[in-house]
Amino acid sequence: MTRKTRFILFIISICLFLVISYGVVLYALGYQYDTTLRTFLKTGAFQIESNFDGDVYVNNSFAGKTSFLNSKFSMARLLPRSYAVRLEREDFQTWTKDIRIESGRYAEYPRVVLIANEPKVESFASVSLNTILTMGFANDKLIVRGTRQAIAFDNKTASASFLPLVVADQRIASASTRIAPDRQKEIVLTPSTISIRWLTDASYQPYRNAGEQVVILKTTQKINQVLWYRDSNHLLVLSGDRLQLVEIDTRGVPNIVNFINITSPFAYDGEKNIVYFIVGKNIKRLHL
């Protein structure tokens, strides 16, 4: 091998070293080459956390399972663009979201809720009132208010006792507060629109400022009743005769789960995650 050949090989080796080193450094800093834009872009990531574990798909390809320890799933080194993400679990309704990944940013969805396709429904008690005006759950008792009488049912024994109407109205009002359990936001309601107004700066994504108001749901049907779900990130909405779980995260399209049709008012026990409603003279409870 001549000196000239050795020199050429040396120069080529130096060039290859510099190119590879540059690529390694860019990769270590979170950059990837975008073949569409033909340039290096800083990548982003996302994480979802659900109430149940499940299978995660990204752009219709299986991406992995949520952790069995905390039902979290994260994916990094994603080029900036939108990704169709869905979380599936057998016998449960699917959660879907178009997640927008921004360069160098981390998108977090910490309060994903999966609802069973057929939630468990059981009989709880019988009620003798002819007309049911309102219901509420307070102090571990279900309050059912009629036109002239109100009855309180013990949550454990289903034993019934009559309540003065004024007391019943006070307890139902306290159970139907428009302030979220986390005290950070409130419901703003019209006959066909549900909005959320933030009372303080949001402590988790999507970040909102105090005083900011966002429309969550518009419907052609009358909104009969709205209660907060226990995670402060979803609403239980009775619109027409459909009881729905509505996500308040407006990134992408909010998930709306229709899980039962009812014609009565409903009450919600957030601690046990149970919905109470009436069919005929029977009080039913649905386990979410």
Image: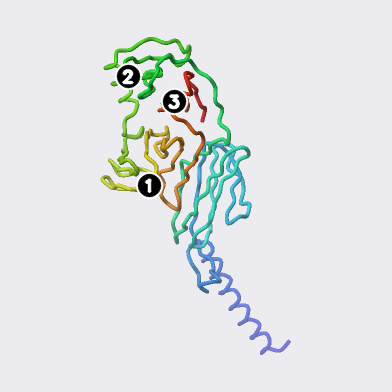
x, y percentage for residue 114?
53, 39
x, y percentage for residue 3?
68, 88
x, y percentage for residue 148?
31, 15
How many C-alpha atoms fall within 10 Å of the one at disc 3: few (<14), some, or many (≥20)?
Answer: few
Q: Are marks 1 and 2 in contact (CB under 8 Å)?
A: no
- Residue highlighted by disc 3: 271
Q: Amino acid at mark 3?
A: Glu
Q: Quadrant of the N terminus?
A: bottom right
Residues 32 and 139: in front is 139
Q: Amino acid at mark 1?
A: Lys
x, y percentage for residue 149?
33, 14
- Residue highlighted by disc 1: 218
Residues 78 and 194: in front is 194
Is 72 placed above or below 272 here? below
Is 105 placed above or below 40 here? above
Q: Earlier in the sequence, mark 1 or mark 2?
A: 2
Q: On the image, which quarter does residue 185 sit in?
A: top left
Q: On the image, which quarter does residue 104 sit in?
A: bottom left
Q: Earlier in the sequence, mark 3 or mark 1?
A: 1
Marks 3 and 2, how far apart at CA: 29 Å
Disc 1 is placed on an element classified as: strand
- Residue highlighted by disc 2: 147
Q: On the image, which quarter does residue 131 sit in?
A: top left
Q: Amino acid at mark 2?
A: Thr
Q: Is residue 122 left or right of residue 190?
A: right
Q: Earlier in the sequence, mark 3 or mark 2?
A: 2
Q: Are marks 3 and 1 in contact (CB under 8 Å)?
A: no
Q: Is residue 167 left or right of residue 106?
A: left
Disc 3 is placed on an element classified as: loop
Q: Which of the two discs, 3 and 2, sits closer to the camera?
A: 2
